């Protein structure tokens, strides 16, 4: 994978850009001036990221992910990530049939939902999963592959399915590993 140079990243005009950020030269970034990206975060090939997006430190967006922040925005807590093809929408058309849909139709004929999406620390979202507007994916949540998350989750839980439902609690052992990692990083002066 080829990543943009530090100079190319700075030239994009991000609202904030941390250290050691890697963005594929094949990713599409729209509205960089509304985006904040933390240290050691990475956006891979064929991702589309648009609108207001806040990415914490050590966040990974695997290939083919879509993050549609729009005006409400999407925020990613530290150490979170999206597996291949996962999608997050902070806005969506009304699919009920009560209104018209799609971006070619003027707003007065539509009833779009606009609501911020929050992805907490240590969240992992599985391949081809979809997170809908207004959802808070709580700290430590794991979302299984191909899940449709319509409602906010409980912290440190595992969710699967369409629609996503809680399967069981998730272990928190990784919090000690985070402490060790951050201590080592501080010791090395990174």
Image (cartoon, rainbow, N blue to C red):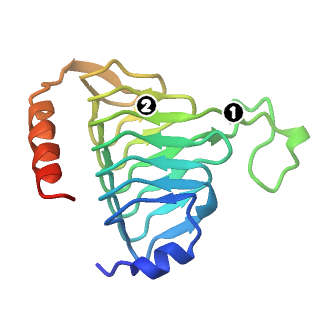
The quadrant of the image that shows the C terminus is bottom left
Q: Percent position (x, y) of residue 117?
A: 52, 35
Q: Which residue is mark 1?
A: 113
Q: Which mark is residue 169?
A: none
Q: Which residue is mark 2?
A: 149
Label 2: which secondary element: strand
Label 1: which secondary element: strand
Dividing the picture into quadrants, the one containing residue 98 is: top right
Compared with 139, 34 (above or below) is below
Compared with 74, 7 (above or below) is below
- For image coordinates 47% across by 34% down, the residue present is 118
- For image coordinates 9% across by 29% down, the residue present is 173
Q: Could you tell whether 91 is left or right of 180 in the image?
A: right
The quadrant of the image that shows the N terminus is bottom left
- For image coordinates 17% across by 24% down, the residue present is 170
Dividing the picture into quadrants, the one containing residue 85 is: bottom left
Q: Could you tell whether 125 is left or right of 10 in the image?
A: left
Check whether the beta carbons of the residues at disc 2 and disc 1 lie within 8 A of each other. no
Q: Percent position (x, y) of residue 161?
A: 32, 30
Crowd class of label 2 (few under 14; some 14 to 19; many from 20; radius 10 Å): many
Marked residue nearer the N-terminal end (2 or 1) = 1
Q: Percent position (x, y) of residue 34?
A: 62, 55
The residue lying toward the viewer, choosing from 100 and 42, is 42
């Amino acid at each position: 994978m080829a990543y943009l140079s530090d100079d190319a990243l700075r030239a994009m005009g991000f609202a904030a850009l941390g250290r050691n950020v890697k963005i594929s030269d094949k990713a599409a970034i729209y509205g960089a001036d509304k985006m904040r990206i933390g240290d050691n975060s990475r956006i891979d090939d064929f991702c589309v990221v648009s609108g207001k997006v806040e990415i914490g430190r050590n966040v990974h967006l695997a290939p083919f992910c879509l993050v549609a922040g729009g005006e409400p925005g999407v925020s990613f807590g530290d150490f979170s990530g999206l597996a291949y093809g996962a999608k997050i929408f902070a806005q969506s058309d009304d699919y009920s049939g009560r209104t018209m849909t799609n971006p070619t139709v003027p707003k007065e004929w539509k009833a779009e939902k606009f609501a911020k999406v929050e992805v907490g620390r240590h969240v992992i979202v599985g391949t081809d999963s979809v997170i809908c507007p207004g959802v808070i994916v709580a700290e430590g949540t794991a979302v299984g592959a191909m899940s449709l998350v319509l409602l906010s989750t409980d912290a440190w839980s595992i969710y699967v399915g369409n629609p996503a439902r809680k399967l069981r609690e998730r272990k928190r052992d990784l919090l000690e590993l985070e402490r060790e990692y951050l201590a080592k990083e501080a010791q090395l002066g990174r």
